[in-house]
Amino acid sequence: MLACLGPGVALATEEVPSLAGNALAIARVQTNADYIWTLTAAALVFLMQAGFAMVCGGFTQAKNVGNMMMKNLFDFAFGALAFWMLGFGLMFGTSPSGWFGTDGFFLSGYTAGGDTWTLAFWMFQVVFAAAAATIVAGAVAERIRFRAYILYSIAVAGFIYPVFGSWAWGGLLNGSGWLEGLGFIDFAGSTVVHSVGAWVALAGALVVGPRIGKYAPDGTPRAIPGHSLPLATLGMFLLWFGWYGFNAGSTNAASTDVALIAVNTTLAPAAGAVSAMVTSWLLFKKPDLGMSINGTLGGLVSITAGCANLNPGGAVLAGLVGGILVVLSVVFLDRIRIDDPVGAVSVHGAGGVWGTLAAGLFDANGFSLGQIGVQLTGIAACFIWSFGTGFLLFKAIHATVGLRVSAEDELVGLDVTEHGCKGYHDITLSAVK
Amino acid sequence: MLACLGPGVALATEEVPSLAGNALAIARVQTNADYIWTLTAAALVFLMQAGFAMVCGGFTQAKNVGNMMMKNLFDFAFGALAFWMLGFGLMFGTSPSGWFGTDGFFLSGYTAGGDTWTLAFWMFQVVFAAAAATIVAGAVAERIRFRAYILYSIAVAGFIYPVFGSWAWGGLLNGSGWLEGLGFIDFAGSTVVHSVGAWVALAGALVVGPRIGKYAPDGTPRAIPGHSLPLATLGMFLLWFGWYGFNAGSTNAASTDVALIAVNTTLAPAAGAVSAMVTSWLLFKKPDLGMSINGTLGGLVSITAGCANLNPGGAVLAGLVGGILVVLSVVFLDRIRIDDPVGAVSVHGAGGVWGTLAAGLFDANGFSLGQIGVQLTGIAACFIWSFGTGFLLFKAIHATVGLRVSAEDELVGLDVTEHGCKGYHDITLSAVK
Amino acid sequence: MLACLGPGVALATEEVPSLAGNALAIARVQTNADYIWTLTAAALVFLMQAGFAMVCGGFTQAKNVGNMMMKNLFDFAFGALAFWMLGFGLMFGTSPSGWFGTDGFFLSGYTAGGDTWTLAFWMFQVVFAAAAATIVAGAVAERIRFRAYILYSIAVAGFIYPVFGSWAWGGLLNGSGWLEGLGFIDFAGSTVVHSVGAWVALAGALVVGPRIGKYAPDGTPRAIPGHSLPLATLGMFLLWFGWYGFNAGSTNAASTDVALIAVNTTLAPAAGAVSAMVTSWLLFKKPDLGMSINGTLGGLVSITAGCANLNPGGAVLAGLVGGILVVLSVVFLDRIRIDDPVGAVSVHGAGGVWGTLAAGLFDANGFSLGQIGVQLTGIAACFIWSFGTGFLLFKAIHATVGLRVSAEDELVGLDVTEHGCKGYHDITLSAVK
């Protein structure tokens, strides 16, 4: 009789329903719902890779767009393989010290014991690892060698990100990190994912140096406008879309908790877009699209840590402040001659720090000074680890395979010199104005 | 023992399974499934915002593409904040009169009582409100001031749309609208969302007037071709994708009803694409891509009201007629000198009216003349309210902050004059043909 | 009391919970979860249509991009209607002979008996049928007439694909195919979907012949570069995103099995991207973006058959080999003067054959020579049927309505000559370098 209901999985109760059998079957259905939710969310987060590619590609010059596409593809490709081999075990394996995991490499937890939850969890986590690695792409864009980029990608997704991740999130599977032991709140990764990426990006931008022509001889920053605002806008929408998976999927369970998270993931970026746009209007006399895009993304980063423990009003506040901070940070970095072509450090770094603080400041469960101390501890630990290892990494790459393309190649563009291609061909069919 | 099944939420039956405990646990799992379905669908509908941006951007000129991106971003950003503060309460709050809701502003239903369903429902509804507001973007494109646009966006998402919405859908939460009292069928919003947007768009296009150069001195319409058909096509696909969430998510429940809705949401736009393409072939001697895109969207609007009560054959019919109507409407509006650069009024207005009628005409539960009368009542009420308030709104904006950019600015393009940016830079790297 | 849990469907147990009632309710909730998973996955697969459009559009010339968009839209539009009328019945109807189904046309299974599972299943299958048809678009691009394309699309989605599909998958609903009777492993369609499309594409490319200028008078192949690599990259990401629905949705049930499938669908394309990139680096001295994109897609095709029965390590191997094969196949086809502008035959044909073999070779349940024999049987049957009927089809179209545009039209571009439009207008607003 049950069969006529549809293709449902075999239920333990098909033969003779019993109390215990029913209870088991209920748990099984809930588990199935958890899996499809986690994997749907993972797919959404995966699409953020396209979002990063379009934002980074749109905000940089046409002569480097093919190179940006390569980077975003191989961030994920090498990142996924590195996270499979090494990173996942470092992050979620048994962690006797609380500083890094020691087993579960090559998904051995599954291949040995057939534990399918390990697989679902890996799937969700791998897209996070790739996101952390990809954040760097924009900050070192238009001047880094492709082979240097590959090395860095593997290092971030396979080592830098997972080690920090194990401190804050290891307990989600088999680990037990010292930071989560303190009660650090970072639900979906304002610090764990975004700040890690941002501080490595900052190290990269410092070591590789500004693009040729970015600063006038007297040090005045000059704008090098991106080549396609529609592409960047599309990327922003794809990122926002994926962020519903990023934040709400971090429940790793089909539950009613996802509703608050999704609402907050809507209101904070909306507020960030508005505040960044207004700030740009005040500063530059016109409402700026690039700043609005980065303000939206800053609003998203600002709610990532606290998406599950802030009320909607708190999310609006978090986003409002986040949007302003991103614009001010972009202007500030420009002034101190750190060339970050797409604003990655501002969006993910300034936004990440603020979001992590906001998760404590606006906690719907009540404010406590102790919590703020814990949040600051996590923020500081993240900076020290990510900027430190990132700096060493880029210095090491510089000293070995070489970090930066030649000035000649930079002027010609990386598409031709690194990949032997052009991003666009004969796109203009009608007369040029 | 249950724990080993996975990360499932704690079940009431974990200790000692009982009949009542199991029943409660079953309801809880179903509720969890309802939430993840509703939020997955909401995420899909959110992506329609990217679809609207790409269609509108692709169908307009390159010199205004940055402005179109700003509009589509801020439709959503201001729209979400307005719907949070005001609109949601007007639409779904307790409605003693049946004409508008009176509570639930700022999501107070949640913050006071912790009612998470209010949050999930808000999340789904906010993306609808933004869609209604965004429909106008295309019709007033390439000539409206950005600050005027912001005001209008807030008014539509915060007031015009929610008030009409309360008449037809208020009962979905705490309200009780007069139109739903009559038995008005509009499952996912051919009238509630699309026609509201279209009639406000019509009012906007009328008040702001045609673009410079759209009509020859003798009144003959001239084509101002869109700058990127791939962008517009991408947008169409994103809209169709999101529409699966729009229509099937309107169940607000994980249920087997979603199957029929998804099938209808496939067949109607397929039929609309074909009939619009054939119509364009007959009228213009060649199968036209722009008309095919709009016919597809027209097919989608045509099945939005009746997606849950038409059989697949009815969906094909609804789409076929919808596709033809959209093409004829585009030609007609062009002739009577209403300049709608992207065909928004035709797709969402003609499509919306037809879809609302089709929900009665092809009702799988049987045809009744009374129902057609109700459908016509809803259609008329929507036109009177939306066009009326829209007209007043645009007149008021015109009289205060100003509606239209200067002729000079219009010729230069809104990207440079309104936002100080250019949509594209140096995109052509090889010789121009 | 249960009502306060949310909007859950009415449960049989609401009144007086009973053991049997609870069991029934559990099955119902599982069924609801199956439906929303299947339809979510179907929506993801639908978006692959946008992915195909962007990859094909990006890899071809700007003067034909509108035509590519038309083809990808109408592949789906005509394909969906043909699959509704004819194809679904041929593929999944009662199949007394094991060679094709004989009922279920026009979704009569639903309209007669109200069987909603038929609808959900159709929804998932229709996007597969359209994918098979769309694969051909790239191989015959830039020279085929639009009306020829319409005929071919209908034939593939309505006849060629469903008949082969009934041999391998008919038993998923009401049929029983001879190939599935042998134990053929092709979980999500390396052969059923991708190879069918590829062999029809090969037939089309052969019959229609190479593009003007593709080969120098001495037969040396010349590169005709695609006009937009960002568009192609976006398409690749959309395809990968949709592939999570394609593979994991093929469970047609909310189950824990989706985890392994999703992991494999991540690792294989990552490996394919890397191996194709490295191969291109070795062959052409630079890491090539186009080859990397096709290697990624080749990795996806390579895991489609075995996504549910390979371990993650096997998926990496399948993808690694798949990525290399795609590059070698592209080079080989170029040499033997088969002009496939986007590499469709290599990605879906070489990848499809390899993936089908890999599903046997790396089977986590153990290797058996007999299984390899069955896999080879399926591969051969697919080639004979798809290439054979495809060849006849294109010859028949050539002999009747005509297959290829005139040389003049080909040089001008199909956008202008077939559709009276241009893909881009005035996109360059700043000085051209």
Image (cartoon, coloured by chain):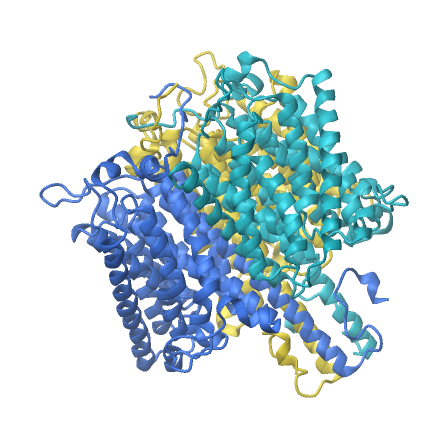
Chain colours: A yellow, B cyan, C blue
The residue at the point 65 percent across, 67 percent down is C32
Q: Quadrant of the C terminus of chain C?
A: top left
Q: Position of residue C396 (x, y in %)?
A: 25, 59
Q: Quadrant of the N terminus of chain C?
A: bottom right
The residue at the point 33 percent across, 63 percent down is C195
A428 to C61, vertically: above or below: above
**Name of the residue lying farthest toward the front:** B369
**Name of the residue lying farthest toward the right:** B96
* Residue C274 can be seen in this image: no
How many marks overall? 0
B174 to B364, vertically: above or below: above
Rendering quarter of residue C419: top left
Rendering quarter of residue B138: top right
Q: Residue C431 or A87: which is nearer the viewer?
A: C431
**Name of the residue lying farthest toward the bottom:** A16
Q: Is residue B346 left or right of residue B250?
A: left
Q: Residue A265 or B62: which is nearer the viewer?
A: B62
B404 to A409, vertically: above or below: above
Q: Is residue C48 left or right of residue B114?
A: left
Q: Position of residue B340 (x, y in %)?
A: 56, 29
Rendering quarter of residue C412: top left
Q: Position of residue B210 (x, y in %)?
A: 57, 22
Q: Residue A387 or C285: which is nearer the viewer?
A: C285
* Residue B331 can be seen in this image: yes
Q: Is residue C381 left or right of residue A49?
A: left
Q: Residue B156 or A13: which is nearer the viewer?
A: B156
Q: Position of residue B58 (x, y in %)?
A: 48, 33
A116 to B85, vertically: above or below: below
